[in-house]
Image (cartoon, rainbow, N blue to C red):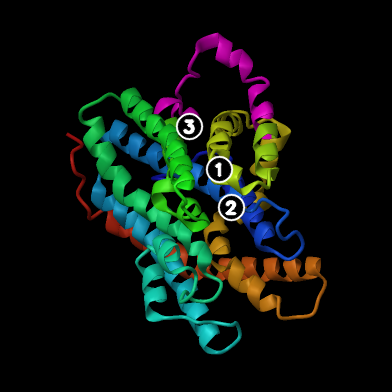
């Protein structure tokens, strides 16, 4: 969440909420009841907002976006923990601790970050055990491949607001595209895990980062009318978000649910970044909550493995979930200490050796 000391309040708290929503959704206590999938939508929106905020800030401060530094940060942040999780899953499957039908093609899909389209074509057979959540990494990695070059090109020709409106327009078109695919007979995986059908949440966060970014001091659009509405709009948005998340109908989930949810996240993000004195926002910035947020990436990578391994024991569902959560957080802390932090130090050393490319 930081770039050369830059810090956006509350976002680690949002990460913590998102990863716990996902964890509970995959757990044993509330199967098929808890809307774990909305945690991924939150992650996508947050990633789009954060990445474009950092790229915009870099360009405004230096006149450039360094593609080399961007990809160096992404590679050293994302790949080492992911590869460790993949190796752990392959080993656990090979030892027979979890049922596995792992193939080289399934492992390659995760290593090369196209798990989502592998699932669309082949299903989940062949993947290392309990790693199907890697589909979302594929969506994010494909986004990371495109967005810096796209911003470099578009911001060199258009002003920031036009670029933001263009991204928002594409985000609004994608749910129509999803509906058209669904009417043409596309299945669940094609609609739910494909980059082209799920990137709208990332684009919506990116558009907010360009059009109305409280972390970079942008004023509220719409003047005093919107400022007055912000007294109640975040609360209404939170209620609508929760209600939309609780709708079980698959046709709604695969069509416009994400669009409703990321539209709600816009005022919610504005509120949690700017209203640090409010009780709920203070909770997001508590040390323990922030710590879960810091560990959220590794928690996401390892949580299904932990649930699968703990689930072999004959215990009540809440105890299984609690034990799996403790094991997941412990594994995430080990990975953070032994892998993520050393990689961050290596990244900082290497960044100083990568020349910046002029945005023009």
Mark 3 to mark 2 CA distance (whole Å): 18 Å
Labelled pair 2, 1 in contact (Cβ < 8 Å):
yes
Q: Is residue 176 left or right of residue 311?
A: left
Image location of residue 247, percent across then percent down: 68, 43
Q: Is residue 238 left or right of residue 341?
A: right
Q: Which residues are magenta?
A: 209-238
Whichever of callouts 3 and 1 sits on the residue coming sooner in the sequence is 1
- Determine the secondary structure under disc 3: helix
Mark 2 to mark 1 CA distance (whole Å): 8 Å
Image location of residue 67, percent across then percent down: 25, 48
Does the stretch in magenta take in 215? yes
Residue 348 image-quadrant placement: bottom left
Whichever of callouts 2 and 1 sits on the residue coming sooner in the sequence is 1
Residue placed most toward the observer, 65 or 304 = 304
**Label 2 neighbourhood size at 10 Å, few (<14), some (14-19), many (20+)?**
many
The residue at the point 19 percent across, 43 percent down is 357
Q: Is residue 93 left or right of residue 211?
A: right
Residue extending farthest to the front is 184
Image location of residue 208, percent across then percent down: 45, 31
Mark 3 to mark 1 CA distance (whole Å): 11 Å
Q: Which residue is mark 2?
A: 293
Q: Which residue is mark 1?
A: 11
Residue extending farthest to the bottom is 95
Q: Which residue is mark 3?
A: 215
Whichever of callouts 3 and 2 sits on the residue coming sooner in the sequence is 3
Please, what is the dominant secondary structure of the magenta stretch? helix
């Amino acid at each position: 969440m930081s770039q050369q000391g830059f810090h956006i309040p509350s976002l680690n708290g949002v990460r913590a909420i998102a990863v716990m929503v996902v964890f509970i959704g995959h757990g044993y206590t509330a199967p098929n009841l808890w809307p774990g999938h909305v945690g991924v939508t939150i992650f996508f929106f947050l990633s789009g907002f954060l990445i474009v905020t950092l790229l915009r800030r870099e360009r405004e401060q230096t006149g450039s976006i360094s593609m080399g530094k961007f990809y160096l940060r992404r590679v050293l942040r994302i790949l080492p923990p992911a590869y460790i999780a993949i190796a752990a899953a392959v080993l656990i499957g090979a030892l027979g601790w979890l049922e596995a039908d792992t193939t080289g093609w399934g492992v390659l899909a995760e290593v090369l970050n196209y798990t989502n389209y592998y699932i669309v074509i082949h299903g989940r057979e062949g993947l290392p055990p309990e790693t199907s959540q890697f589909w979302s990494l594929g969506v994010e990695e494909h986004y990371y491949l495109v967005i810096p070059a796209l911003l470099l090109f578009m911001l060199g020709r258009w002003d920031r607001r036009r670029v933001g409106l263009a991204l928002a327009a594409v985000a609004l078109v994608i749910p129509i595209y999803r509906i058209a695919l669904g009417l043409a007979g596309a299945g669940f995986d094609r609609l739910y895990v494909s980059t082209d059908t799920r990137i709208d949440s990332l684009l919506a966060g990116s558009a907010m980062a360009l059009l109305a970014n409280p972390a970079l001091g942008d004023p509220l659009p719409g003047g005093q009318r919107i400022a007055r509405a912000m007294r109640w709009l975040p609360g209404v948005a939170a209620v609508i978000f929760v209600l939309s998340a609780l709708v079980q109908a698959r046709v709604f989930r695969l069509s416009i649910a994400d669009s409703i949810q990321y539209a709600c996240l816009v005022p919610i993000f504005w509120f949690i970044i700017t209203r640090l004195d409010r009780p709920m926002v203070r909770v997001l910035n508590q040390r323990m909550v922030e710590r879960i947020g810091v560990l959220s990436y590794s928690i996401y990578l390892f949580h299904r493995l932990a649930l699968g391994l703990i689930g072999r024991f004959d215990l009540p569902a809440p105890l299984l979930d609690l034990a799996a959560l403790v094991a997941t957080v412990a594994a995430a802390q080990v990975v953070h200490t032994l892998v993520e932090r050393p990689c961050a130090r290596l990244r900082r050393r290497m960044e100083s050796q990568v020349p910046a490319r002029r945005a023009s």
